[in-house]
Amino acid sequence: MVGDEIFLRDGALLDSAMKSMFEFSYDIDDRLKQLELERPVSPLSRILNAYLAVLSSEYSPSRSALEEVHSIRETFTSISIPERAHLDVIEAWGSGEFNRAQRLLDALLIQFPKDILALFVGHQLDFFLGDAQSLRDRVGSAVTEFDRSDPMYGYLLGMFAFGLEECGWYERALEVGHEALDRAATDVWALHAVVHSHEMRAEFYDGLDLLKNYESGWTGSNFFKPHNYWHKCLYLLEIGDIEGILGIYDSMINPPGAGIVALTLLDASAILWRLFLDSVDVGDRFEKLCSAWEECLDEPFYVFNDCHAIMAFVGAGRFDLADKQVDILRNSIATSDLRRSNAVMTSAIGLPVAEAIVAFGRGDHRQVIEKLYPIRKEFYRFGGSHAQRDVFHRTLVESAICLPDLSLAANLVDQRIALKEGSPYNWFAKRRILMKLGDPNQALLAGSMGDSFVR
C-alpha cells in the first residue's frame, strides 16, 4: 500500500503540477505535458487532465472525460490501485453521479489519506454539492497526517480554511487561511477562504484591504482571478461603489473577448443580477452575457449553472430563452436517471429557483415567494457557497418588499440583521420597509445604521 500511496508524490515535476492545480495556474497544461513526457508509461497526466474536464462543471467536457477514462483503461496494462480508484471517481463524476463520486473519494482517502489529488478534487466536488461538513472534514482529517514541512501542507490549510468558513467557524478560518497565505501568497484558494470569512462577518473594508495587500499574489496568471474579483465586487456593492463594480466587471469578470466558460459566466450573472435587484442600469451587459450563455449551455449537467444563465436571459429581457431553459430543466427531471445527482438537485432546488427568477423578472412576486420561501433553508443542496447562494435570499427579500403585506419582508430582513448586523444592504432594506409602513422616524434610524458601516 505504501508504494501505491506515494505514486502521487514521488517526483518534483508532479509536485509542480499539483502546485499549479492548487493555484489554478495558467501553466497547468504545460506541467501536464511535461509530466506525460517524464512518465510515458503512467496514466497520471491523463488522469489529471480528465479531472480538469469534470471540474469545468459542464456537460461536453465531462463527456470527454468519460472517453478519456475508457482510453486510459484500454491503453495502459499496468494501473495502480489508487489510479484505478481515480478512474472510477472520474467515471462517476462525468456520468453525473456526483454523490457516488464523492463516496468513492471518501473510500479512497480512508485507504490513502495522503493522496493529495484526491484531497484537491474531493474538496472541489464537496463545493459543487454544497456539502460544508465534507469541505471541512475531508481536508481536516488530512491536515494532521501531513508533515508541516511538506510543500503541499500550506495548500491543505487553504482548503481547510474554506471548509471552516462554510461551517461558520470564521475566526478559525481566518487564522488558518492567513497561515496558508504566509506559506504561499499565490495560494488563491486560501485567499478566497479569508475573503469569504470577511464577507460573512460583514468586514468589507478588511476584505478590501486583504485583496490589496495580496494583490501581486492573486491577480497573476490564474483561472481563479475573475472569481476573487467577483468577491471584491460584493464588498463594493455593500458600500455602494457601483462605478467600481462595473469597471471590474468590464475589465476582469467579463471583458471583451473573454472565453465562454460556465464558471466565469456564473460570476458575471451573479453580480449583474444583484445590480438588477437594486434597479441599477447596467447598459447592454446583460444582452452580451445572454449571448455568451446561449453559446455555453449544453445538456443539463449542473443546475447551479442553468439558474445563473436564466438570470442573464431575464436581465436581457429574453423571456423566450428563460422559459425554454426552464422547460429543459423540467424535462430533464422527467427523463433523467435519478442516480444522476443533477436530476435530484434540479427537482428539489434548481427548478423552483429557476422558476422564481423568471417570475421576478415578470414582476410576479407572489410566485417568487411561493417558490423560494419553502426551500430557503435548503439552497445549499444545489451547490455553491453561502456568499453565492445569498443572491437567492436577496431575490426573496426583494419580492417580499414588493408585497402589500410587509410582515414577511420585515421578518426576513430582521433575520439577516441578526446574523450580519454590519451589512448596509440589510439596514437599507429595513429602511425601505419602514418607509412603506409609514414610519419615517424609524426608517431614518435604520438608514443611519446602514450609513454608519460605510466610510
Image (tube, rainbow, N blue to C red):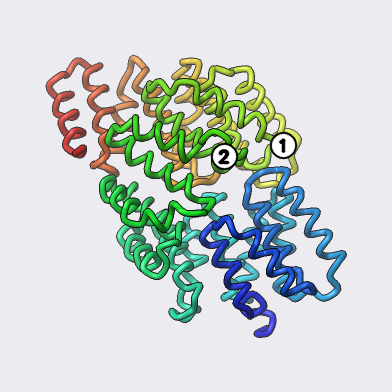
Q: Decide if residue 172 is on the left or right side of residue 339.
A: left
Q: Position of residue 142 (x, y in %)?
A: 50, 73
Q: Is residue 163 visible?
A: no
Q: Secondary structure at mark 2?
A: helix
Q: Which residue is mark 1?
A: 299
Q: Position of residue 384 (x, y in %)?
A: 50, 46
Q: Residue at x 72, y 70 (%)?
A: 83
At a point 27% along the width and 36% down the height, the residue shown is: 239
Which residue corresponds to the image point at 42% horizontal and 24% vertical from the top-left? 276
Left or right of 227: which side holds 94? right
Q: Position of residue 290 (x, y in %)?
A: 58, 26
Left or right relative to 113: residue 301: right
Per the image, the residue denoted by label 2 is 304
Q: Is residue 233 visible?
A: yes
What is the tally of numbered marks visible in this picture? Answer: 2
Instruction: Tell me, for residue 255, which label it has, or none.
Output: none
Residue 37 horizontal/vertical position (percent): 74, 70
